Amino acid sequence: MKFRKSFVAVVVASVLLTGCATLTEDAMTPIAVSLSNGKNADCVFQNKRGIWEAEIAATIIVRKSDDPLKYECKLKNGKEAVGMIPSTMGAKIVASAVFLDFGIVDSITDKHRKYPSNFVIPVKN
């Protein structure tokens, strides 16, 4: 009987403490972005959640999304760099799917998604 009460207490604590990413994660995330050649550029970043402009090298703050973060950069010397920063799934979606809402809320808000904390944009010489 004592084991059963302890087990139930652990399960309840797990449910309460491992909430979904919607409750524990911010919708915005910072990404330190630089160019592989060490130069500066004017860049536009875009996903389905928004568009952000920045002069890099810099740390940009973007809205998390399940699609890649597309970038288009124009260097001062006229060259361009175009590509995507991949989005991955965070671990908290698993807890949400198992314990609370089957991951439905996180799938709608994309707060469970992750972009790398820093990214180097390749520039052809």
Image: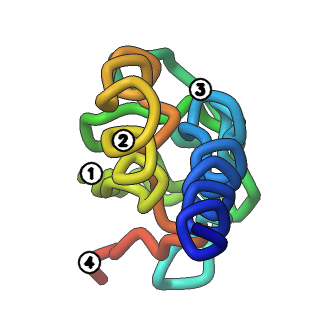
- What amino acid type is highlighted by mark number 4? Lys
Quick one: 68 or 35, which is closer to the camera?
Answer: 68
The percent position of residue 80, horizontal first and vertical second, equals: 33, 52
Whichever of callouts 3 and 2 sits on the residue coming sooner in the sequence is 3
Nearer the camera: disc 1 or disc 4: 1
Give the residue at mark 4. Answer: 124
- What amino acid type is highlighted by mark number 2? Leu
Residue 73 seen in this snapshot? no
Circle 3 crowding by C-alpha within 10 Å: few under 14, some 14–19, many from 20: some
Circle 4 crowding by C-alpha within 10 Å: few under 14, some 14–19, many from 20: few
Q: Quadrant of residue 48?
A: top left
Circle 2 crowding by C-alpha within 10 Å: few under 14, some 14–19, many from 20: many
Mark-to-mark CA distance, 3 and 1: 14 Å
Q: Quadrant of residue 40?
A: bottom right
Whichever of callouts 1 and 4 sits on the residue coming sooner in the sequence is 1
Residue beneath the point at 41% across and 69% down:
121
Are the two marked residues, 1 and 2, in contact with CB atoms closer than 8 angstroms? yes
Circle 4 sits in a helix, a strand or a loop, which is it? loop
Residue 2 seen in this snapshot? yes
Disc number at residue 84? 1
Vertical position of residue 125 compared to residue 4: above or below: below
Vertical position of residue 97 compared to residue 92: above or below: above
Nearer the camera: disc 4 or disc 3: 3
Give the residue at mark 2. Answer: 69
Whichever of callouts 4 and 3 sits on the residue coming sooner in the sequence is 3
Are the two marked residues, 3 and 2, in contact with CB atoms closer than 8 angstroms? no
Mark-to-mark CA distance, 1 and 4: 16 Å
